[in-house]
Image (cartoon, helix red, strand yellow):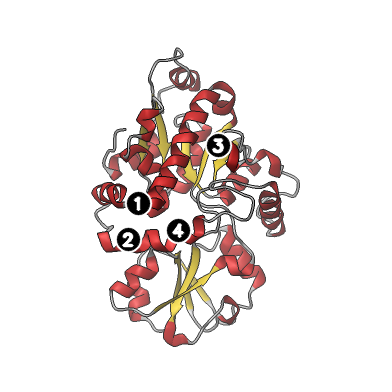
């Protein structure tokens, strides 16, 4: 696998393939059987623990064992939308996203499909000050809240919570304002921003958005219907290696965390160690479901919720078409 610098690769996400037809791109992805071709997997953010299993599959040679040459493309600001566009244009074959993005993409006519879900519980949280006395999201009042207010989780909060005197401002991905403003809250991932805030002397308290019923699968591996139809062998090999990568990353993240730190200098060893420990419980599957598995019931609920938010037209997405578990090991189906 080839890891390039983040700036170059973000540019690739936005601009690659402009002079190349879809037919040419598909031809590359469907080369003669047995020929080893480069397969692209785009991340939805800079490399962090939420991508650990996929990076472990590369770092530990699991892609190589499946005769794969996988190029992992780091993301950054704008990547969650950009990778869906790249999948639609058939310039990449795989990407890491969240289940709600899959639903919205399909509503927009982009035939993306989720293949596996390492994070069974969503890591999205709202970080408040411990000194505020706020203990649950229903008590979120009289604060300035940094949030991506057009995302489905934020729309769900607006619909389900009082949010009395909550002033929403754009989320910039940093914790600086949180550290200096006592009446400030912000979105985050439970294994990321809270650690940074505490390390810098803050008093973060985590309130999980899943506690109010919005809980889409996260760090989902996605592809398109055309890749599934044209290269099922490729899909099976990538999924198999990725599932093993997640199993090995959660069992021993040491080597992969060293690789992540090499790709993302903002990730200290302490932050990565904390991140894996905080993320591990989110990867636990429900009774009767193996790691990385998905259920129709969860997808039905998610589609219904996003319809309720009027973020997609009612009936525009069929839940059963959002995911495909047939490439997972039998125990995870």
- The image shows residue 19 at horizontal and vertical percentages of 40, 24
Above or below, 228 against 252 in this view is above
Question: CA–CA distance between discs 4 and 2?
Answer: 11 Å
Asked whether the beta carbons under mark 1 and mark 2 sit within 8 Å of each other, the answer is: no
Q: What residue lies at 26% left-to-right and 52% top-to-bottom?
A: 261
Q: Which mark is residue 329?
A: 3
Quarter containing the N terminus: top left
Q: Kindly tell me whether residue 43 is visible in this rendering.
A: no
Question: CA–CA distance between discs 1 and 2?
Answer: 11 Å
Helix, strand, or loop for circle 2?
A: helix
* Left or right of 176 in this view: 34: right
Q: Which residue is mark 2?
A: 273
Q: Which residue is mark 1?
A: 252
Q: Kindly tell me whether residue 98 is visible in this rendering.
A: yes
Say which label, 3 or 2, has the lower sequence index.
2
Helix, strand, or loop for circle 1?
A: loop
Q: What residue lies at 71% left-to-right and 49% top-to-bottom?
A: 313
Q: Which mark is residue 280?
A: 4
Task: Tell me the crowding category of disc 1: few under 14, some 14 to 19, or many 20 or more residues within 10 angstroms, Cα based.
Answer: few
Say which label, 1 or 2, has the lower sequence index.
1
Q: Nearer the viewer, mark 3 or mark 2?
A: 3
Question: CA–CA distance between discs 3 and 1?
Answer: 21 Å
- Seen as rendered, the residue at the extreme right is 315
Quarter containing the C terminus: top right
Q: How many marks?
A: 4
Asked whether the beta carbons under mark 3 and mark 1 sit within 8 Å of each other, the answer is: no
Question: CA–CA distance between discs 1 and 4?
Answer: 11 Å
């Amino acid at each position: 696998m080839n890891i390039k610098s983040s700036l170059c690769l973000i540019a690739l996400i936005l601009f690659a393939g402009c002079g190349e037809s879809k037919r040419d791109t598909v031809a590359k992805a469907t080369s003669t059987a047995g020929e080893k071709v480069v397969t692209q997997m785009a991340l939805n953010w800079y490399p962090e623990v939420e991508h650990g299993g996929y990076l472990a599959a590369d770092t530990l040679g699991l892609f190589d064992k499946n005769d794969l040459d996988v190029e992992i493309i780091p993301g950054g600001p704008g990547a969650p939308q950009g990778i869906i566009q790249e999948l639609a244009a058939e310039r990449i074959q795989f990407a890491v996203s969240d289940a709600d993005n899959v639903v919205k993409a399909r509503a927009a006519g982009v035939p993306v499909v989720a293949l596996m879900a390492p994070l069974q519980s969503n890591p999205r949280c709202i970080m408040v000050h411990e000194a505020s006395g706020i203990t649950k999201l229903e008590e979120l009042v009289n604060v300035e809240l940094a949030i991506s207010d057009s995302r489905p989780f934020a729309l769900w909060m607006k619909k389900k919570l009082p949010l009395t005197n909550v002033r929403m401002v754009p989320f910039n991905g940093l914790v600086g304002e949180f550290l200096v403003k006592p009446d400030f809250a912000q979105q985050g991932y439970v294994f990321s921003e809270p650690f940074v805030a505490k390390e810098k002397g803050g008093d973060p308290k985590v309130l999980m958005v899943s506690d109010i019923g919005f809980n889409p699968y996260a760090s989902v591996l996605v592809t398109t219907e055309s890749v599934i139809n044209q290269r099922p062998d490729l899909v099976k090999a990538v999924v198999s290696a990725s599932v093993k990568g997640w199993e090995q990353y959660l069992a021993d993240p040491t080597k992969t965390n060293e690789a992540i730190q090499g790709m993302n200098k903002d990730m200290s060893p302490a932050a990565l160690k904390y991140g894996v420990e905080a993320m591990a419980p989110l990867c636990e599957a429900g009774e009767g479901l193996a790691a990385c598995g998905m259920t129709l019931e969860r997808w039905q609920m998610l589609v219904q919720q996003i319809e309720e938010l009027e973020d997609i037209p009612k009936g525009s997405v069929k839940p059963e078409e959002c995911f495909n578990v047939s490439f997972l090991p039998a125990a995870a189906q």
